[in-house]
Amino acid sequence: MVTGTADLTALEEELSRLAGSVPDPELPVLTLEELGVLRGVHVLAPGRVRVELTPTYTGCPAVEAMSSDIERVLHEHGMADVSVVTVLSPAWSTDDISAEGRRKLAEFGIAPPRHQGGGDGPVPVTLAIRCPHCGSTDTELLSRFSSTACKALRRCTACSEPFDHFKEL
């Protein structure tokens, strides 16, 4: 039983770590934490938790699988009553993808999205998309849509390899 604020905070942090470790169903190389869609985990009562999830775009078909996977993981760790709610505000942005998530996307062969500058850091002025295979910025758009709506299909003209680019939102 959770008795104090410190215990409650520690439990919420542990449950958040567990929920955040769930792989994205469309990009299993990323966890939900790295993708930046996990917005909060709140213990409401002993064994009862509410998880807040923001989809990458409204109507994203992966939300159902994400919710189911989060529920399963938290049930396995003693939470009897898990509710996953969709939170649309603030809207998800590709700036929410962690640095580790961006690194994993590139390593997996998907060009990560460029930062849009929503934070306090420097705003890149380049519009070039870097090839995740050879690093060249000499790339061309083949299709605005790829295997999922959030990715575009590009080809590197330097190494001739096709690759997905996670579009900026």
Image (spheres, helix red, strand yellow):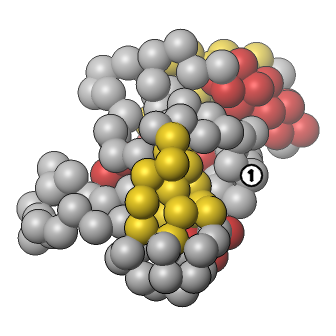
Q: Which residue is mark 1?
A: 28
Q: Is residue 103 above or below residue 114?
A: below
Specify the quadrant that holds the C terminus.
Answer: top left
- Image check: 72 left or right of 66? right
Q: Nearer the viewer, residue 158 or 34?
A: 158
Q: Nearer the viewer, residue 56 or 72?
A: 56
Residue 68: percent from left, percent from top: 79, 24
The residue at the point 79 percent across, 33 percent down is 69
Q: Residue furthest right?
A: 76
The residue at the point 16 percent across, 50 percent down is 118
Instruction: Answer whether residue 111 is visible to the viewer in this image.
Output: yes
Q: Is residue 115 above or below residue 62?
A: below
The residue at the point 42 percent across, 82 percent down is 136
The residue at the point 21 percent across, 52 percent down is 116
Q: Secondary structure at mark 1?
A: loop
Residue 112: percent from left, percent from top: 46, 62
Total numbered badges shown on the rendered structure: 1
Q: Amino acid at mark 1?
A: Pro
Q: Nearer the viewer, residue 53 or 79?
A: 53
Residue 39: percent from left, percent from top: 44, 36
